[in-house]
Every structure is written in C-alpha cells, then in structure tokens.
C-alpha cells in the first residue's frame, strides 16, 4: 500500500475527528534493519518485503521487528 492509497481509505472511511491507530512501516525501516542484521537489501527488495508483510499481516499478531527480521532472513537465504 502506498501513501496515496492509505489517504484514500482514510478519507473514505473516517471523519477528521475519528480516533484511530495505525502502524506505519517504511522502506527506510526495512533497509535500516537489514543494515543492522548485515543483510544486503535493495530499495526494490525492501518495497517487495513491505508488500508481502501488508498482504499477509494478521490482526492477531500485528507487525513487529520479528516480522521484518523473518522476511529479511528469507531474503538473505534466497540471495545466499
């Protein structure tokens, strides 16, 4: 999901004074974490990881650094 899509959803489904919560993760978050874990991750790969996380997210578990680490480790094994 990109910012434009999120804005559309927010404008369509919510009023300006509605109280909500939302987690935001960016490409920079993914690439910074990859650097910390010493995993090479391009901008394109980081975007793909964000899309996969978005498509498979679970309301029961949310998104955490463990989630990001899982996808980065998968990437590292594929590139291995």
Image (cartoon, helix red, strand yellow):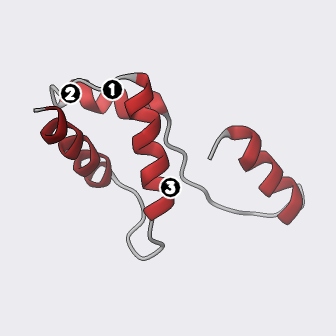
Report the mark closest to the observer, 3 or 1. 3
Sequence-wise, which precedes: disc 3 or disc 1? 1
* Residue displayed at 28% across by 47% down: 71
Find the residue positioned furthest to the left. Answer: 80
Label 2 sits on a secondary structure element that is helix
- State the residue in front, 22 or 38: 38
State the CA–CA distance, disc 1 to disc 2: 6 Å
Say which element carries label 3. Answer: helix
Q: Which residue is mark 3?
A: 54
Q: Tag 3 or tag 2, which sits nearer the N-term?
A: 2
Residue 55 is marked as: none
> Compared with residue 43, is residue 5 higher up or lower down, i.e. above or below?
below
Asked if marks 1 and 2 touch (Cβ < 8 Å), the reply is yes
Q: Quadrant of the C terminus?
A: top left
Callout 3–callout 1 Cβ contact below 8 Å: no
Say left or right for 12 vs 30. Answer: right
Kindly check if marks 2 and 3 are in contact, taking CB atoms under 8 A apart as contact: no
The residue that disc 2 covers is: 36
- Name the residue tied to disc 1: 32
Q: What residue is drawn where x is 18% and y is 43%?
A: 73
Residue 51, percent across and down?
A: 49, 47
Where's residue 64, x and y in %? 35, 54
């Amino acid at each position: 999901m990109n910012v434009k899509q999120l804005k559309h959803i927010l404008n369509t489904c919510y009023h300006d004074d509605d109280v909500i919560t939302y987690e935001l993760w960016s490409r920079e978050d993914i690439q910074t974490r990859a650097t910390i874990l010493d995993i090479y991750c391009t901008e394109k790969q980081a975007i793909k990881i964000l899309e996969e996380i978005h498509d498979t997210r679970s309301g029961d578990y949310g998104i955490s650094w463990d989630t990001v680490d899982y996808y980065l480790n998968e990437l590292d094994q594929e590139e291995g």
